[in-house]
Amino acid sequence: MKAVRFHDYGDSKVLRYEEVPTPVPGPGEVLVKIAGSAFNPVDDGIRGGYLQQVFPVDLPHVPGIELSGTVALSAAGWPAGEPVIALLSMTAPGSAAEYALVPAEALVRAPRTVDLADAAALPSSALTAWQVLFEHAKLQKGQTVLINGAGGAVGGYAVQLAKQVGAVVTATASKRSADRLRARGADHLIDYTAEPLSGQFDVVVNLVATEAPGFNTAGPNINVFLRPDPARLADLVARVDAGELVIDVAERRPLKDLAAVHDNPAGGGKSVLLP
Ligand SMILES: NC(=O)c1ccc[n+]([C@@H]2O[C@H](COP(=O)([O-])OP(=O)(O)OC[C@H]3O[C@@H](n4cnc5c(N)ncnc54)[C@H](OP(=O)(O)O)[C@@H]3O)[C@@H](O)[C@H]2O)c1
């Protein structure tokens, strides 16, 4: 099969589109024929070697921590041809390939109402948004929430989920993302390229690495780490199929372009790679 791998850590030039053996499922694993593999900022850190302590990978490594596709061989109760999505382990061989192995318990039925490749853009970002808002911040109806970095993939889901629970949502976004976020439910927008952050909020979600001037948290600061949760992911899929959660894909590109995406992801939503 074709896959992108890196044999050494380094800049995007280490990513090679090459022929590799198609993986063979072991007990409890399902072989998935990939329709889409979505890029995440963490892929950049893993490839660059900055995250070796937290996410040690075996080299050569296939990057990519989430996918959509179809079950290639019937296994572990999953029929061949079933459309699925999954969040993968950060350190396992990943989704930048034509096929990937997924532990059966990590598989979730894909949404039926969106393009299967685009469904790859759901798992990591939507789960992160959910966990930040409801497991850590315990956001409730009527509370005010600032989502800093709402133009990105996590932020787009966070705006929608916060709005659905009845929160009053302020989003920071540049012009390219403002209309989309308004349509997704943001009550107030701050253009971070033109004005400083101001205001007081019950909950602040910071999705930007460098904090903006005026950013001040009086309450507890919590660093969130995404954890796998297939049951919650199935609930998020149901929301997509109910028309309550929109998957925003900023760009779809052939898998062989992965290095260019690592260098310059589109922003304003997810980049999805097509094998
Ligand atoms: N710890 C975890 O488990 C976990 C999980 C997922 C993500 N993350 C982290 O969360 C962050 C967001 O992830 P993501 O996937 O949503 O990233 P992303 O899609 O790459 O976010 C890109 C967006 O960030 C916005 N942005 C850039 N600079 C900004 C600034 N100064 N102020 C406000 N917005 C700014 C831009 O919005 P505009 O389009 O409006 O310009 C851009 O579209 C990343 O740092 C990622 O590593 C952590």
Image: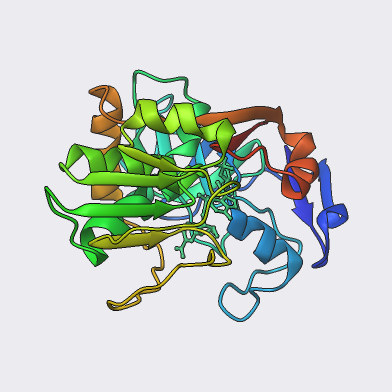
* Foreground pick, 153 / 34: 153
Q: In which quarter of the image is the N terminus?
A: top right
Q: In which quarter of the image is residue 215?
A: bottom left
In the rendered image, the residue lying farthest to the left is: 141
Give the x, y percent position of residue 239: 25, 31
Q: Can residue 187 be seen in this view?
A: yes
Relative vertical location of residue 118 with respect to residue 214 in this rendering, above or below: above
Q: Can residue 234 be seen in this view?
A: no
Residue in the picture at 16% in, 43% down: 165
Give the x, y percent position of residue 235: 22, 40
Q: In this view, does 142 lie to the left or right of 20?
A: left
| Number of numbered callouts drawn | 0
Q: In this view, does 221 lie to the left or right of 238?
A: right
Q: Which colour scheme is used?
A: rainbow
Residue in the picture at 53% in, 62% down: 90
Give the x, y percent position of residue 123: 41, 45
Q: Is residue 118 left or right of residue 186?
A: right
* Foreground pick, 35 / 247: 247
Relative vertical location of residue 8 with respect to residue 41 in this rendering, above or below: below
Q: In which quarter of the image is the C terminus?
A: top right
Residue in the picture at 68% in, 58% down: 44
Residue in the picture at 79% in, 36% down: 256
